[in-house]
Image: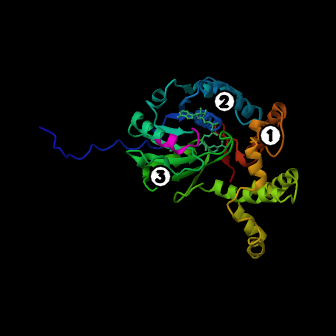
Amino acid sequence: MKKADHAPAAPRPSLASRNAIRQVAVLGLGTMGHGIAQSFALAGFQVTGFDEVRAARSSLQRRVRGNLEDLADAGLLKRALIEPVLARIHVADSEAGALREAQFVTEAVREDLAVKQALFARIEALVPPSAIIASNSSTFMISQSAAKMQHPERAIVTHWFNPPHIVPVVEVVPGPRTNAATTRATLALVRRLGKEAILLRREIPGFLVNRIQAALMREVWDLLDQGVASAEDLDAAVRGALGFRLAALGQLEVGDFGGLDVHGAVFRNLAPLIKSDAKLPAAVAKLIAAGHLGIKTERGFYTYTARSAAAKRARRDRIFLALLKLLYAPLSPSPWRRRS
Ligand SMILES: NC(=O)c1ccc[n+]([C@@H]2O[C@H](COP(=O)([O-])OP(=O)(O)OC[C@H]3O[C@@H](n4cnc5c(N)ncnc54)[C@H](O)[C@@H]3O)[C@@H](O)[C@H]2O)c1
């Protein structure tokens, strides 16, 4: 019998469910992508990565091995698990090769909306129809990145934090066209990684963390610009007072401990005085214009040599791992579930 011209489309296979996902693809293997690939492999997934730059592909195993050795040194990973984890990480030499069998894809390519939109449209054509497609964008909502997709219901943001193989939280941000099955499966997946999934009820630019960070950035940069304190003292104040507390408590909990009457007065008295415009503070604008972009150019707010930068990064990671150990139960191979 001839098929009717307007027969309803065949039902799409159900979205990869919680336990069905085994095969993951990561596109873009830079700062974020390599650590994201590692996190999936650590939790038992088969991961295939692709990067358009050959050096990023060929160095993937070496970079992940270094991270895994740091975890083992910190007592967060059994050394015997390093080789099995690495054996689950594969590198494809084409985008299509990485995507062919993927049930969950995350992109971590550069922050350029046109690149992300074109990539999402291509991914959709290359993955199995039930695959979920996620973006690690820091600023673009999924309604923007997935604007050119045929089936945006299976697209979602999973926003990781640097270094992604260490920081325990991942923001999960569905868009208005993401369906409930995609959100459910993504939340379950992030939790299977041992990460803390933070679900936003609606999409909003910058999600939660980057908005909060931007508020802090504005004030710290303005205080530096005004010369109220040195860069060293500003950082010491943030680290030793705010950061120290915030490692144990959320900002709202800090308010409850301090007393909302007190915090309300602090807000009323100070909010009119702190910077509230959108102009980049001059001290920062000047550094950027001069090409002083931080560790990667060996000069930002501080100056570095290759050696001092490596030492500072190593110190940062040692402290992060110690915190992880302190605050999150060591449930190897996914050690970072929050202690209740
Ligand atoms: N660095 C961070 O702190 C951070 C944190 C959270 C989210 N993000 C977001 O993650 C994404 C990646 O950031 P990053 O810091 O890892 O950048 P990065 O520059 O370190 O890495 C990006 C990688 O993507 C590759 N790439 C670019 N276009 C590609 C394409 N079309 N196909 C395949 N590979 C491609 C590049 O070669 C590079 O290796 C961005 O969207 C960024 O906003 C970054």
Q: Secondary structure at mark 2?
A: helix
Question: Rounded to the nearest whole Å, what is the CA distance between mark 2 and mark 3?
Answer: 32 Å
**The disc labelled 1 sits on which kind of residue?**
Arg
**The disc labelled 2 sits on which kind of residue?**
Val
Left or right of 21 on screen, residue 332: right
| Pointer 3 residue | 143
Task: Say whether residue 47 is magenta.
Answer: no
Mark 2 or 3: in front is: 3
Quadrant that contains the C terminus: bottom right
Question: Rounded to the nearest whole Å, what is the CA distance between mark 1 and mark 2?
Answer: 27 Å
Left or right of 301 on screen, residue 177: left
**The disc labelled 3 sits on which kind of residue?**
Ser
Q: Secondary structure at mark 3?
A: helix
Residue 79: name its quadrant. Answer: top right
| Pointer 2 residue | 64
Q: Which residues are magenta?
A: 109-117
The quadrant of the picture showing ligand 1 is top right
Q: Nearer the viewer, residue 13 or 236?
A: 236
The residue carrying mark 1 has its beta carbon less than 8 Å from ligand 1: no
Q: Nearer the viewer, residue 84 or 261?
A: 261
Q: Give the x, y percent position of residue 239.
A: 82, 53
Quadrant that contains the N terminus: top left
